[in-house]
Image (cartoon, grey):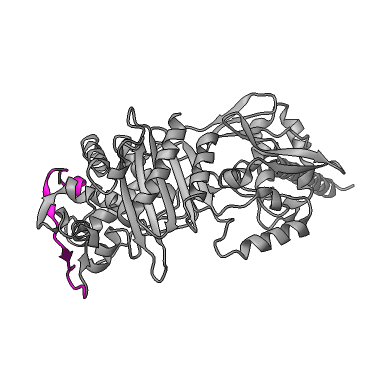
Amino acid sequence: MRPGIDRAVGYSWVVAIVMVIALMANVTYLQGFEAQDLRDDPLNARQYADRNKIDRGPIVAGGERLAWSEPVSGKRYQRRYRQSTVFAPVTGYFSPFAQTGLENAENHILDGTDARLATTSFVDKLIGKHVPGGTVEATIDPDAQRAAYAALQSSGGRRAAAVALDAKTGEILVLASTPSYDANDVSVLNGQQAQRAFNRLNAQPLKPLLDKATSELFPPGSTFKTVVASSALVAGSGADERVRAGRSYRPPGAGRAISNDAGDIGGQCDLSAIPLIDAYAQSCNTTFAYMGAESPGNDAVHREAAEYGFGAPIKIEDGMRSAASSFPRTDQPSLSALGSIGQGSTVATPLQMAMVAAGVLNDGKVMRPYLVSKLTAADGQEVGRGTPRQLSRPLTSDQASDMRRMMEEVVRTGTGKSLQGTSVLGGKTGTADVEGAAYNDRWFIGFGPRKDPRYAVAVMTEASGYGIESGPIAAKIIDALAG
């Protein structure tokens, strides 16, 4: 060959070798580092193929198996759930098409594809050698979860939910919801059978597949006055400082006045000015409507609500978030006044209101709620653990002390005094009117036990009556946790 041709052939070989190396590097990168993201892509239908041929690890809590896999014919595995209507908000389901709850949040630990479970070489991972599924240990207290679910069911509420948190760590100890569903009905091997179960559940008006504790929003009624009172403390008020009260209050520009509950007529709320602690204990609408409309005003209440977690979904675990609670940001005093008594466009999840109570109890610090206590490989080696993390600090220590004293006054002399003698040390009742409905959203948030209080609880039941009727449920939950 001529020298020029030899040189061209040599260049071609160099280019070909470089391209082969680049291709191998790209394949290695995709298989070694991007494979999981590609498998999880919503457009990748292959992620659902053969999913029942994997022996998924268990979900456990308090030494009890809540979810596990059993072998069936054809080298397939059937997912099983213990007392699923009780624990469904925690485990979620694993169907032929999707997964929810911890089944989704820790899907790759359970199916063995999480990189933390790999105990062999990088080459084994590249060639697709399967690693056994790991175990997910939840923070839930099984006995307290059962007590909460039973109490919610017996409340007569059309919808109901309860959340209990360890205020110092953020661990979710109770996450109960009713109406509920049985994950065994949808976590089946046959896709058509699963779809029929989904169709039946989705056709029910109260949507049992939707967790009421984290995924549905309700007007929080007077429990939101805890946030408004906090904003007043941050603005410089004290628990014993006199604040505006009165039988009615008309916000600037409003066509209608806001009044106290009929049962308050002749009581402290009728007076023109009373201590903040008494206005909170007696739940004077006029006091907190005025605070939201004028002083400290909408901006202050909105900022304080955001500090507690309002305005954005609350991350529980990766792939597991709550609905976003909200308080209106508005320049219309009438809307801010109504929102400040937990009505109008103010809505919250029970998880969010439990976080409010927990922040007060925990010296003004709100911890990020979490549901995974520990992750272990099939050989028992720990590969992950839930870690307490501070989310925000809406109150200083002194302000939180004032707010705790106010919540304790509710139980001592206020709207929650029927809880005296129970394990509830402090709390706040709330009754939210639901327009056009014969029922109310009955709320109670609080903390206990009385000696060394540690647990923050929020309970919502939908039925006729008042928020105090949810208080005994909170007491039963605290009893179960402290027992």
User: Does residue 178 appear in this view?
Assistant: yes
The answer to whether residue 474 is left or right of residue 61 is left
Return the x and y of residue 169 as percentages of the image width and height. 42, 33
The x and y percentages for residue 440 are: 39, 61
Would you say residue 139 is visible in this rendering? no
241 drawn magenta: yes
159 in relation to 176, above or below: below
Q: Start and end of the magenta stretch?
A: 232-255
Tell me what residue is drawn at x 16 percent, y 62 percent. 247
Residue at 37%, 58% in the rendered image: 465
* Residue 270 at x, y percent in the picture: 14, 58
Using residue 368 as the reference point, say whether residue 32 is left or right of it. right
For the residue pair 141 and 317, the one nearer the viewer reads as 141
Residue 318 position in % (x across, y down) = 54, 44
The residue that appears at 80% across and 46% down in the rendered structure is: 7
Number of callouts: 0
Residue in the foreground of this view, choosing between 482 and 218 = 482
Q: Residue 278, relative to residue 209: is it above or below?
A: above
- Outermost right residue: 1
Horizontal side of 369 relative to 233 (left or right) equals: right
Query: Is residue 444 depicted above or below 327 in this figure?
Result: above
Against 278, residue 336 (above or below) is: below
* Quarter that holds the C terminus: top left
Q: Which quadrant holds residue 245?
A: bottom left
**Which residue occupies the foreground of this view, 23 or 19?**
23
- Which residue is rendered at x = 58% and y = 57% of the image? 208
Dominant secondary structure, magenta: loop
Tell me where residue 288 sits by quadrant. Answer: bottom left
Q: Is residue 279 magenta?
A: no
